[in-house]
Image (cartoon, rainbow, N blue to C red):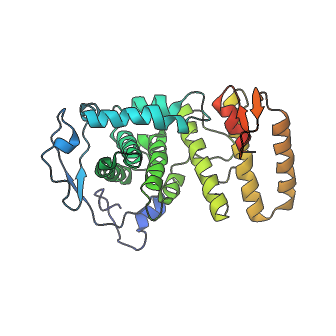
């Protein structure tokens, strides 16, 4: 909400004019109090702070200082070791581990998203006490996102898009009423897909993750994607490019089906068959695994490619 970010807000409901024009999610909740908290090497649950007070939220300081807390450092490690590989399934450069990990060390927006996601994931897998910590960092991340301007470096370099992808995962795990609200917000952060893919590897990684989330949402809700992929020219120079190519074809197929366009549908089916027959890799072992067959391949992106067919 612009008012929280010290910007003019016309108070229009359900979405104010400024957020409508910029494509941001408009936060209509009561503004939370952001209280400065003195940092130390103690765990957050040892701090002399009343976290039960309504509206409490941790004010995120420098990530390097935050990480002196063993609890925060453990959450950060959990993201790098357990969560980031899911985002990097189709990325041989491992941008969501390598770049997010490095950039989060100095960028509070990305750091807040990482800690919120890692904490909520662990709260669902045996450490329920981390839920409060997750909610606090989630709130701070939202405040930082809302305060961004269109020309902000975090939007231009893909940091905001990556943070928004992580926030959507957070909200799915948090079982929020609308876990797709950040899927809508991320759309405004997407680079154009009219004919080319961005050259920046980190921006590309965020784009592919967003596009796959958009595909999932469209299949569940039986609706077209928010993204029009157009006639994108993708260079198939690496193995993970083949997984990304079938993602583009699937996105185009869903949009064509929604538009009931007979001509493009036939062309797309031919393109998918051509893609399938020209894959430069194959499984080195296949067997009957019961409900699902067991297929083993050299690279994770090889297997991910075949699941998108």
Image point (54%, 38%), residue name: 86
Q: Quadrant of the N terminus?
A: bottom left
Q: Residue at x 66, y 27 (%)?
A: 299
The one nearer the camera, 39 or 120, is 120
Residue 15's place in the image compared with 208, above or below, is below
- Which image quadrant is residue 279 in? top right
Residue 170 position within the rendered picture, expressed as x and y whole percent measured from the top left? 43, 50
Q: Residue at x 76, y 26 (%)?
A: 284
Give the x, y percent position of residue 106: 33, 32
Horizontal side, residue 72 vs residue 150: left or right = left
Q: Left of 296 or right of it: where is 30? A: left
How many marks on residues? 0
- Check the image and name the residue furthest to the bottom: 13
Residue 104 showing in the rendered view: no
Q: Quadrant of residue 12?
A: bottom left
Q: Quadrant of the C terminus?
A: top right
x and y percentages locating residue 136 in the rendered image? 29, 51
Residue lying furthest front: 290
Q: Position of residue 124 (x, y in %)?
A: 41, 49
Q: Is residue 13 visible?
A: yes
């Amino acid at each position: 909400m612009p008012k929280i970010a010290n910007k003019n807000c016309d108070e229009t409901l359900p979405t104010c004019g400024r957020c409508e024009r910029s494509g941001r999610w408009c936060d209509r909740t009561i503004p939370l109090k952001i209280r400065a908290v003195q940092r130390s090497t103690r765990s957050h649950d040892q701090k002399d702070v009343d976290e039960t007070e309504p509206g409490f939220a941790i004010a995120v300081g420098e990530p390097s200082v935050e990480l002196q807390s063993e609890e925060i450092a453990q959450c950060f490690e959990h993201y790098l070791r357990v969560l980031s590989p899911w985002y990097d399934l189709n990325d041989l450069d491992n941008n969501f581990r390598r770049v997010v990990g490095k950039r989060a060390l100095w960028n509070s927006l990305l750091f807040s998203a990482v800690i919120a996601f890692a904490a909520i994931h662990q709260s669902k897998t045996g450490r329920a006490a981390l839920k409060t910590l997750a909610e606090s960092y989630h709130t701070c991340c939202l405040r930082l996102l809302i305060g961004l301007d269109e020309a902000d470096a975090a939007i231009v370099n893909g940091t905001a898009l990556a943070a928004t992808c992580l926030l959507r995962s957070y909200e799915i795990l948090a079982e929020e009423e609308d876990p797709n609200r950040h899927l809508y917000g991320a759309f405004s952060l997407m680079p154009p897909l009219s004919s080319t893919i961005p050259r920046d590897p980190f921006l590309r990684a965020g784009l592919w993750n967003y596009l796959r989330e958009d595909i999932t949402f469209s299949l569940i809700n039986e609706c077209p994607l928010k993204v029009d992929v157009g006639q994108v020219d993708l260079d198939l120079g690496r193995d993970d490019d083949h997984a990304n190519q079938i993602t583009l074809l699937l996105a185009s197929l869903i949009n064509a089906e929604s538009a009931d366009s007979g001509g493009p549908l036939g062309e797309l089916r031919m393109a998918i068959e051509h893609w399938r027959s020209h894959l430069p890799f194959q499984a080195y072992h296949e067997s009957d695994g019961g409900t699902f067959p067991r297929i083993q391949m050299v690279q994770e992106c090889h297997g991910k490619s075949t699941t998108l067919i």
